[in-house]
Amino acid sequence: MAKAKRWAKELGIGALLVMVVLFGMDFLRAPQAPADFGHQSLQTLDGQTVTLNEKSQQQPLLVYFWATWCGVCKLTTPDVGKLAANGENVLSVALRSGDGSQLQRYLQAKNIEMPVVNDPRGDISARWDIGVTPTFVIIDKGRVVSTTTGWTSYWGMKARLWWAAR
């Protein structure tokens, strides 16, 4: 019994340390939304012009900063596409991933459909101070309510969107 208590205590302390490190990394790598982020017009690959304020009024918006060359993004991008396919409010920003036709071919090859804003020179991402891909930003009614970086599961993204709606 004493051995089980010791193991439980050590597991608890280990889990707490991992959480502190992960939250600390998210804090240090968090993007900084530009002052006018909500009003900036963005054009998607399919020609739609949107603003983040407009897209986040009815339900929380997941803004997904990613790149075709990013190893972790290869794991998370299909899940973001699945969220979009299942009706979640998603807008992605492809950072330095080629021109529009290259990006379109990449998405078609991977069978991913989601709204994508191409950021070929990294201008949009630089304005947001994106230092890590992938970066996930949740915006609700024009206000940034959550950010995280690195790998996140489908259910983790879905939970963040659900939480933002509460």
Image: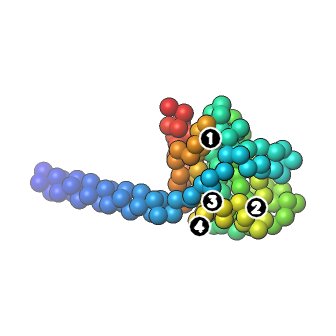
Residue denoted by label 2: 119
**Viewer-nearest of discs 2 and 1:** 1
Question: Alpha-carbon distance for marks 2 and 4?
Answer: 14 Å
Question: Alpha-carbon distance for marks 1 and 3?
Answer: 15 Å
Badge 3 or badge 2: first in the primary sequence:
2
Give the colour scheme shown: rainbow
Label 1 environment density (alpha carbons within 10 Å; few <14, some 14–19, many ≥20): some
Label 3 environment density (alpha carbons within 10 Å; few <14, some 14–19, many ≥20): some
Label 2 environment density (alpha carbons within 10 Å; few <14, some 14–19, many ≥20): many
Question: Alpha-carbon distance for marks 2 and 1?
Answer: 21 Å
Q: Secondary structure at mark 3?
A: loop
Q: Secondary structure at mark 1?
A: loop
Question: Three-letter amino acid code at disc 3?
Answer: Trp
Number of the label disc, if any, that sits on residue 131: 4
Residue denoted by label 3: 128
Residue drawn 50% across and 31% down? 166
Q: Is residue 104 above or below residue 80?
A: below
Relative to the observer, which residue lies in front, 31 or 84? Answer: 31
Question: Three-letter amino acid code at disc 1?
Answer: Gly
**Viewer-nearest of discs 3 and 4:** 3
Residue 163 lies, in percent from the top left, at 50, 37
Question: Three-letter amino acid code at disc 2?
Answer: Asp
- Callout 2 touching callout 4 (CB < 8 Å): no
Residue 109 seen in the current view = no
Number of the label disc, if any, that sits on residue 142: 1
Number of the label disc, if any, that sits on residue 15: none
